[in-house]
């Protein structure tokens, strides 16, 4: 099974975690008729953890699901796309609860054990008749085949241009566990304020506290280090579903050392998904990584990398394949954390352009050609002699992005 | 004298502060042959104060001038455009000092009393032969006519599409003082990293300490509240020149109350210039003000307003005349400072679209038409019941901006 196309190798063992069924259907929420309702149902009570947007303007499904995690008795993740159920007042919360209640009824569990996610247009009430029809249809189609997993992954998409799934095995304690994950893109297109939604699933035995801590660390290393346009949604949610801790089987939870092995693998899975998000950013032509070293600590390095990646001037230089190092260096200079200008060095795609505060004579045309021929550009920025390092991944800024997002569509 | 075209009414008394001569010439630094060297020379020692970029990657002229202000013995502000003298190492500092020394020699003062500013391409040594020729030529053309003032204002421009000057009288203690100011734009175009440079001049009697404090407050209320693309330059400088405190005449310094009157007028002058900067932002089609109220304090309101104004999704909605309130409200939600979602209200160009956390039914097409017919859009955002307020002005984000800035020109 490859990273981006699990459907290409359906014979791989452990392509999907044991004990989970999936469905994705078109309930009619999207005018396009594309799939818009997803169900993920565990056979037995499972550990579920979540990380959520820190936006204070937060959608009803986020408020509701956040109140239920972490849990050791999760059973369902129900998701609709096409409508974010955000900024929808009391009615929005009632509708989010109704989605949980219906999914619980149809799958034979308690509504408290159902998590809900929504993504799509904000400020409009959910079309509950269509949402109900979609959940009912999905409940009748649950299956554990790869096609079911992919149908679920398709149904959470909005403006995504391609499906985003990753699956990987990890061997711990002589046992092979599976980590499979899906997400949908952060690209935004009016009037939708699309959302980053993700579900990471595993059959490894992880308890709720460990799951919550681990998910937070995974997200900090991956989904929190990518950006299309820096706008944080009202609905961003990543869930972790762990089916391996069935109480009836009395399986032993992973030790701290074992969990670290699992977490490293899960971080790689999430990083692959996160990079797919950026590559699928609206109007994105090129993708770039800002790698900062030499900062006082990792937090400082993160702030610098994020600031450089967010600069519209840096983004447009990447779009144009322009090795305009002044934009990168000066963005680092205003990021906030202390840097050492006299020790600052910048290497773009392997070519040092700025060394210890002094510009180097380079063949700019040659470097530009190299940048243009790569779909991914690497800016390696050393800001001093400290131990802090961080990477951040971002899409460039194109005329197509502006065109998409300035269209009048309200 | 109008705000934007002082040349239209040269008969107005006090069109320019007394005791200052100006010149602007083409020294050949710009390949285009446009003016690129400006001199501002006071007849007698004057108070000079400055506020500077907080970027840690900072140009030699900023380091040098910053070390000299505030002063009560300033005589000259020499500026070149076409080359920022930034990231130019030791040679850059030698060249900045040489500019001061030459201007001092030609105007008969001490190099310590000469302030220097530069703007233009970064990372390239100043073409000193041309810079010297320009300073020599300018020194021979100094005059106190309006044409001289305007020539000086023209010579500090880079990618500006129009000259930016404002002049205003203020009556204090029965005496009419003048405040005249010039600035150049923050628009950026590769390979230039253009810079915000400004000089505010007055013949009011203000001492160096008061001048420095007052200039900082003025800049915080004006130049620090505008943004084209959020990228802070290596060279940003605003100077305040006060000629009214000649020691020989024993003029009495403005009292605290009088200074407040002067500062209010100077703030209005600077605000007009700041708005011109935004209106002249690269590729800018429309200009918008984010006015935040109800925050816990003014600092919180400022952070919220700045975050909303910086969001590419908000900017592109303004470009498209799209009353996409979700983008504005959600940007406020991730800005950081605490807001009250249930008390958040948004009024766009006089139409309330979101009230106490609930979307209102509006005629979106009509509002869009109104937005498109205005060159300036006002988003009035109430985030709670606190006393904090702030305004921020920004340009929109257009395809033209991306086109300009992604051109390969290194």
Image (cartoon, coloured by chain):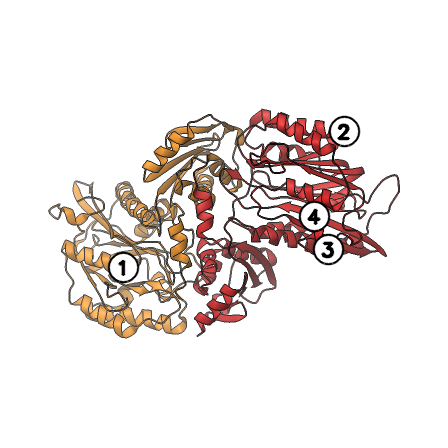
Chain colours: A red, B orange
| Mark 3 vs mark 2: in front | 3
For the residues bearing labels 4 and 3, Cβ distance under 8 angstroms: no
Label ID, residue A1: 3
Question: Quick one: label 3 or label 2, which is nearer the N terminus?
Answer: 3
Location of mark 4 (residue): A181
Query: Is residue A297 or residue B185 the one in the foreground?
Result: B185
Q: Chain of mark 3?
A: A
Q: Chain of mark 1?
A: B
What element does badge 2 sit on? loop
For the residues bearing labels 2 and 1, Cβ distance under 8 angstroms: no
| Mark 1 vs mark 3: in front | 3
Location of mark 2 (residue): A110
| Mark 4 vs mark 3: in front | 3
Q: Chain of mark 4?
A: A
- The residue located at (41%, 55%) in the rendering is B232
Label 4 and label 1: CA atoms lie apart by 56 Å
- The residue located at (16%, 40%) in the rendering is B174
| Residue A406 x, y percent position in the rendering | 43, 43
Label 4 and label 3: CA atoms lie apart by 13 Å
- Note whether A182 is above or below A109 in the view shown: below
Whether discs 2 and 1 lie on one chain: the answer is no
A387 horizontally vs B242: left or right: right
Label ID, residue B156: 1
| Mark 4 vs mark 1: in front | 4
What element does badge 1 sit on? loop
For the residues bearing labels 4 and 1, Cβ distance under 8 angstroms: no
């Amino acid at each position: 099974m490859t990273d981006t196309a699990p459907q290409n190798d359906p014979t791989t063992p452990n392509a999907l975690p044991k004990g989970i069924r999936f469905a994705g259907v078109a309930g009619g929420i999207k005018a396009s008729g594309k799939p818009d309702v997803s169900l993920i149902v565990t056979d037995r009570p499972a550990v579920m953890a979540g990380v959520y947007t820190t936006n204070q303007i937060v959608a009803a499904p986020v408020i509701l699901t956040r109140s239920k995690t972490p849990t050791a008795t999760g059973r369902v993740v129900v998701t609709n796309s096409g409508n974010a159920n955000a900024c929808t007042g009391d009615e929005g919360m009632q509708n989010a609860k109704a989605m949980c209640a219906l999914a619980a009824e149809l799958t034979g569990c308690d509504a408290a054990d159902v998590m809900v996610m929504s993504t799509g247009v904000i400020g409009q009430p959910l079309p509950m008749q269509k949402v109900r029809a979609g959940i009912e249809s999905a409940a009748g189609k649950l299956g554990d085949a790869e096609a079911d997993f992919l149908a679920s992954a398709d149904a959470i998409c909005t403006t995504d241009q391609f499906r985003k799934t990753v699956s990987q095995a990890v061997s711990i304690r002589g046992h092979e566990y599976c980590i499979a994950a899906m997400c949908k893109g952060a690209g935004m297109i009016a009037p939708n304020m699309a959302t980053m939604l993700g579900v990471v699933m595993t059959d490894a035995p992880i308890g709720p506290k460990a799951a919550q801590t681990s998910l937070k660390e995974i997200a900090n290393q991956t989904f929190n280090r990518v950006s299309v346009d820096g706008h944080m949604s009202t609905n961003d949610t990543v869930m972790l579903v762990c089916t391996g801790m069935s109480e009836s089987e009395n399986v032993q939870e992973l030790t701290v050392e074992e969990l670290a092995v699992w977490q490293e693998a899960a971080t790689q899975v999430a990083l692959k998904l996160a990079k797919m998000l950026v590559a699928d950013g609206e109007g994105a032509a090129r993708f770039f990584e800002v790698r900062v070293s030499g900062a006082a600590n990792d937090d400082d390095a993160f702030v610098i990398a994020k600031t450089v990646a967010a600069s519209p001037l840096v983004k447009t230089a990447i779009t144009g394949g322009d090795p305009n190092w002044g934009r990168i260096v000066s963005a680092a200079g205003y990021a906030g954390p202390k840097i050492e200008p006299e020790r600052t060095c910048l290497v773009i795609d392997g070519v040092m352009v700025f060394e210890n505060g002094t510009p180097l004579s380079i063949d700019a045309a040659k470097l530009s050609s190299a940048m243009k021929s790569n779909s991914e550009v690497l800016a390696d920025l050393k800001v001093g002699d400290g131990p802090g390092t961080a990477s951040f991944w971002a899409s460039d800024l194109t005329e197509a992005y502006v065109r998409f997002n300035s269209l009048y569509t309200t």
